[in-house]
Image (cartoon, coloured by chain):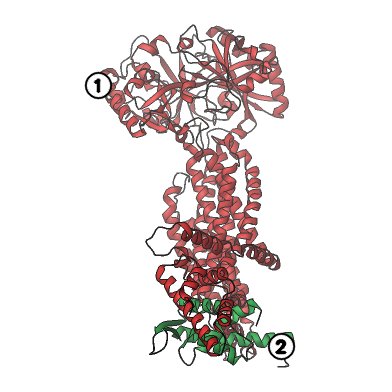
Chain colours: A red, B green
């Protein structure tokens, strides 16, 4: 008698299954073979004949092993519970099995999936469009979020660069990134957690390129700047400490673009001079192409040369004059908390060291914040971007839920096919995989389409993106594409698995029985579909509420009185170089001639100058106090905007004079110093009393604001003007206590904006204005030329972007949710035709049936809306910064959105309800 | 029966059906199918055993070793409750399916 067990064991080889399983399998197979052998012997065969026959029972051992493994429980197939480490043949067998489990027949599944997608074009198209639109919206938003907020600054280890930011909350409630010059000299030692510290500030100089002078943006930087960024000039050298000494500072490093434009990329440019504002600067370096930091428009870098006073003297002036960006790199091993702690210690020590400034620091609640530079730069937009991203994700969620719903509905149609597959021996795993592959095929197509849609959306909102800080970095790169396609794959898998979950209840006889008798199959599936719809309604409600809140905020903003009327007003920047306009006389003379020349241009209604154009970026502020005001000891100084204007400016801007008079030709250099104040400042010092004719002065002794001496600058208040929104209609970026105005005739300014109100086409008028300017000084370029309407639009750009996208998201979400309700009800009616037929046969009126189905739909809607209200309340916190003039929980908005959603849902319910009411009673008999 | 796919689909039904009245061992199941189908359907050990193994793992049948005096140790299989239900379901669906096939393929004039 042969040794059957040994025969089986050698034939089968290692299976990779747990050993007691393997023993059982070998025993059983050997037993059956032995039985067969015995039967053959009993039938009269010779042992050799019988043995030959037995060997034919297992023609292919590998196939046998494979089919046994197919039947093994999934856990054992994927990971058997044996403690022995997986290695050698067992491991090979395991890996082969795993590969087979996942890969076997995948091509077939793909083919089936593609074929089915083609066959069921309606379903496929719906799925494809829904997914592509939802993913496209996500791709667009993610592109912006990633490029602006998530992607680190394009600098080596950019995420370790931090910025210091001095805050004086009682003077300026807004977050500011500025510091005083003295900090540059005591922080490096006191804050070792931050190394390579550097300061910089933006500047503008006229540079002549191609015989045309242009105001060009640049940065004044300390010698450590390029070292900090770890990006050296590609040509020449960076600045040295010697370059930063006064007298030596006429050096410049050019951007790659400016070098190409002005010197045709000639390496000989190094060492030559270039004129900035008419002064020669020696070119010492050229930065690499594509280098951008802080502001993409920066074309040159010049040394930041601190004055003797800034270097050495600790006075209220040097310690309190903010004007510099200060940043550094976290030392290795240090974190931001350490840097913060060290700055706090330094500030506390300084408060003790300088009793003369102590009270001011305490009263203004002075403190310094250390923030990652990137975070600080995108601070204004990151909140709204994250919100929009969340909105887009919600839309995708609703879309995916819709598709799961659709797939579940279809799976009842497919139940017969799937049940037959199961009965024919396909494992549930195989069928689930088939469903997943099918939805993945669609998701892949949708993913690719969504990139095109996302690109389209980005193109459509390009203008708003450009107006956003960091907007120049927005590109749909590989990361975004991978993220989107990965998202598509995840959604596709989830949809496939979601519909495969329906298989659990599936069996052939049920499917067939159902099909023929319209019974009550699939209760769990139906409940699942109902809860999906409720979720969709809730989510779309939240999105719509957010969109409506943004819309209401936007309307409120447009209703805000900006304090000026910018229609037909063009503004343009001008900067007079100190070389050619060395003193007040020269500046005053030029300004008068300029204003006269512009006034004479046909089409010009009025003209004026200002140092602080509304919705612009420039502007200064200064301390001020009323002469008759009794400041308490240690009271903090009030420091509103300080705006130098000429007569005609307020008229040009249409800013109403509330009381008193405007500046005019009486307010000459040698006349009494006068000022105008806005309503906020008047209220701060005089309340309801009339300040006209009283005086204000610039306090010089921070310890005693009331102290005046022969050097104190006094101004007589001659007029009160309407408050102007200078930075943002929502009042963000405003200074506490408004603004005061001084006449340029008494305080000549070299840098200002010209405001021109015109009655003719702006292009033609500006052409003439440029010609007049060139006749006065051919080397003076206008810059930042914009109509006030453009400035208003720019200031609203990010809100417009947010509003537009939120509105689109909200509407898409509502439509998807409506589609969801419609689908569920239509399916419900189709399922319950027989029951409805019986009801009608038993005397139920079509009207009652109509109400029955409608009631079902409205119940789902009501539950969804209730959850939606809860959701809206939950997200109201994060909306608070984005809404203006309305509470994020405004009951009117919630009510209106609920009403609209309810009506849309009602419409979605009507058609299925009508269909139900038309069911013929004979259906109960026929089906 | 030569067609592998057809046999794979029907094998479960055939095995379950043999166990309807009494527990049987593997070799006996194979012999019964062959005899009752007049030799049209026969299973080699290599095709029968994986079916038994799969059915047992899915809880449709249970097997236990039985050692009778003078006989070798054999593994007897019997239907579980869920196996009995599955048998009924498969009978029904196969009935519907086969009737459909017969009509569609013109095998009979039902």
Dots 1, 2 in contact, CB < 8 A: no
| In the image, residue A717 above or below residue A334 | above
Q: Is residue A711 left or right of residue A102?
A: left
Position in image of residue B38 (x %, y %): 62, 92
Position in image of residue A689 (x %, y %): 38, 29
**Residue A28 visible, this angle:** yes
* Disc number lying in front (1 or 2): 2
Q: Say which quarter of the image contains residue B32.
A: bottom right
Label 2 marks which chain's residue? B
The quarter of the rendered structure image containing the N terminus of chain B is: bottom right
Q: Is residue A84 left or right of residue A474?
A: left
Position in image of residue A377 (x %, y %): 48, 33
The quarter of the rendered structure image containing the C terminus of chain B is: bottom right
Q: Give neighbour class at mark 2: few <14, some 14-19, many 20+ (Cα, 10 Å).
A: few
Position in image of residue A234 (x %, y %): 58, 20
Considering depth in this image, is A109 or A767 the residue closer to the camera?
A: A109
Asked whether the residues under marks 1 and 2 belong to the same chain, the reply is no
Q: Give neighbour class at mark 1: few <14, some 14-19, many 20+ (Cα, 10 Å).
A: few
Label 1 and label 2: CA atoms lie apart by 103 Å
Q: Which residue is mark 2?
A: B103
Q: Secondary structure at mark 2?
A: helix
| In the image, residue B71 above or below residue A142 | below
Label 1 marks which chain's residue? A
Q: Which residue is mark 1?
A: A352
Q: Residue at x 43, y 26 (%)?
A: A327
């Amino acid at each position: 008698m042969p040794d059957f067990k040994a025969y089986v064991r050698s034939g089968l080889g290692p299976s990779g299954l747990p050993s007691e399983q393997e023993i059982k399998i070998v025993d059983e197979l050997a037993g059956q073979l032995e039985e067969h052998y015995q039967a053959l012997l009993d039938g009269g065969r010779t042992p050799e004949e019988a043995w030959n026959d037995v060997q034919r029972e297992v023609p292919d051992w590998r196939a046998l092993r494979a089919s046994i493994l197919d039947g093994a429980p999934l856990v054992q197939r994927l990971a058997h519970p044996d403690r022995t480490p997986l290695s050698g043949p067992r491991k090979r067998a395991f890996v082969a099995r795993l590969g087979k489990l996942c890969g076997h027949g995948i091509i077939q599944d793909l083919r089936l999936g593609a074929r089915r997608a083609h066959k069921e074009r309606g379903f496929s198209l719906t799925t494809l469009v829904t997914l592509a639109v939802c993913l496209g919206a996500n791709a667009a938003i993610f592109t912006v979020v990633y490029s602006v907020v998530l992607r680190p600054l394009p600098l080596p280890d950019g995420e370790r660069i931090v910025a210091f930011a001095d805050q004086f909350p009682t003077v300026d409630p807004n977050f500011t990134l500025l510091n005083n010059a003295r900090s540059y000299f005591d922080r490096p030692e006191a804050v070792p957690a931050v190394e390579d510290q550097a300061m910089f500030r933006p500047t503008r100089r006229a540079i002549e390129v191609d015989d045309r002078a242009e105001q060009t943006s640049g940065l004044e930087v300390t010698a450590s700047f390029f070292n900090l960024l770890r990006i050296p000039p590609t040509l020449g050298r960076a600045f040295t400490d010697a370059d930063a000494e006064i007298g030596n500072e006429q050096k410049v490093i050019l951007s790659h673009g400016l070098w190409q434009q002005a010197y045709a990329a000639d390496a000989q440019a190094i060492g030559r001079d270039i004129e900035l504002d008419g002064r020669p600067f020696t070119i010492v370096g050229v930065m690499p192409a594509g280098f951008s930091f802080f502001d993409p428009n920066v074309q040159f870098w010049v040394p930041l040369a601190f004055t003797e006073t800034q270097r050495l003297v600790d006075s209220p002036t040097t310690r309190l004059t903010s004007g510099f960006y200060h940043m550094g790199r976290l030392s290795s091993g240090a974190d931001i908390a350490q840097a913060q702690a060290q700055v706090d210690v330094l500030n506390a020590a300084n408060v003790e060291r300088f009793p003369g400034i102590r009270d001011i620091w305490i009263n203004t609640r002075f403190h310094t914040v250390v923030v990652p530079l990137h975070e600080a730069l995108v601070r204004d937009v990151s909140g709204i971007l994250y919100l929009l991203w969340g909105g887009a994700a919600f839309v995708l969620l609703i879309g995916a839920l819709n598709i799961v719903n659709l797939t579940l509905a279809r799976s009842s149609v497919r139940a017969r096919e799937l049940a037959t597959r199961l009965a024919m021996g396909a494992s549930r795993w195989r069928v689930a995989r088939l469903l997943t592959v099918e939805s993945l095929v669609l998701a892949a197509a949708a993913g690719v389409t969504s990139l095109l849609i996302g690109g389209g959306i980005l193109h459509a909102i390009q203008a708003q993106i450009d107006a956003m800080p960091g907007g120049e970095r927005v590109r749909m790169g590989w990361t975004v594409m991978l993220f989107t396609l990965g998202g598509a794959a995840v959604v596709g898998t989830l949809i496939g698995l979601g519909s495969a979950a329906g298989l659990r209840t599936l069996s052939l006889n049920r499917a067939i029985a159902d099909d023929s008798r319209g019974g009550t199959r699939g209760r769990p599936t139906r409940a699942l579909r109902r809860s999906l719809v409720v979720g969709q309604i809730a989510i779309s409600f939240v999105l719509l509420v957010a969109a409506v809140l943004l819309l209401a905020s936007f309307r409120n903003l447009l209703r805000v009185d900006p304090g000026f009327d910018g229609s037909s007003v063009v503004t343009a920047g001008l900067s007079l170089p100190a070389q050619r306009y060395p003193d007040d006389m020269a500046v005053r003379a030029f300004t008068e001639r300029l204003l006269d020349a512009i006034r004479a241009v046909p089409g010009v209604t009025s003209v004026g100058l200002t140092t602080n154009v509304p919705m612009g970026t420039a502007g200064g502020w200064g301390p001020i106090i009323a002469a008759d005001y009794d400041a308490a000891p240690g009271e903090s100084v009030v420091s509103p905007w300080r705006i130098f204007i000429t007569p005609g400016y307020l008229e040009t801007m249409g800013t109403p004079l509330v009381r008193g008079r405007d500046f005019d030709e009486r307010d000459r250099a040698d006349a009494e110093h006068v000022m105008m104040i806005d309503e906020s400042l008047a209220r701060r010092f005089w309340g309801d009393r009339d300040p006209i004719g009283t005086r204000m002065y610039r306090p010089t002794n921070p310890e005693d604001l009331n102290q005046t001496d022969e050097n104190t600058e006094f101004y007589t208040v001659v007029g009160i003007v309407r408050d102007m929104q200078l930075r943002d209609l929502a009042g963000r970026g405003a200074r506490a206590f408004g603004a005061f105005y001084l006449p340029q005739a008494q305080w000549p300014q070299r840098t200002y904006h010209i405001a021109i109100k015109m009655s003719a086409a702006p292009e033609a008028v500006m052409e003439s204005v440029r010609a007049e300017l060139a006749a006065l000084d051919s080397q003076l370029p206008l810059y930042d030329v914009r109509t006030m309407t453009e400035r208003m639009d720019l200031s609203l750009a990010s809100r417009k972007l947010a509003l537009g996208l939120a509105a689109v998201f909200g509407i898409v979400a509502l439509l998807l949710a409506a589609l969801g309700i419609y689908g569920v009800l239509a399916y419900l009616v189709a399922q319950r035709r027989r029951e409805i037929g019986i009801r009608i046969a038993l005397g139920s009126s079509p009207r009652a049936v109509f109400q029955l189905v409608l009631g079902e739909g409205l119940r789902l809607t009501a539950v969804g809306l209730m959850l939606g209200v809860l959701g809206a309340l939950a997200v109201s916190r994060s909306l608070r910064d984005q809404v203006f003039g309305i509470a994020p929980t405004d009951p009117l908005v919630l009510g209106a959105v609920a009403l609209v959603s309810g009506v849309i849902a009602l419409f979605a319910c009507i058609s299925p309800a009508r269909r139900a009411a038309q069911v013929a009673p004979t259906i109960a008999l026929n089906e | 029966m030569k067609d592998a796919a057809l046999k794979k689909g029907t094998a479960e039904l055939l095995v379950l059906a043999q166990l309807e009245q009494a527990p049987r061992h593997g070799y006996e199941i194979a012999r019964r199918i062959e005899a009752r189908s007049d030799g049209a359907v026969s299973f080699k050990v290599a095709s029968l055993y994986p079916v038994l193994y799969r059915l047992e793992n899915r809880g449709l049948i249970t097997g236990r070793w039985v050692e009778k005096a003078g006989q070798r140790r054999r593994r007897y299989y019997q239907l579980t409750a869920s196996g009995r239900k599955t048998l009924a379901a498969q009978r029904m669906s196969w009935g519907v399916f086969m009737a459909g096939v017969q009509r569609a393929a013109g095998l009979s004039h039902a």
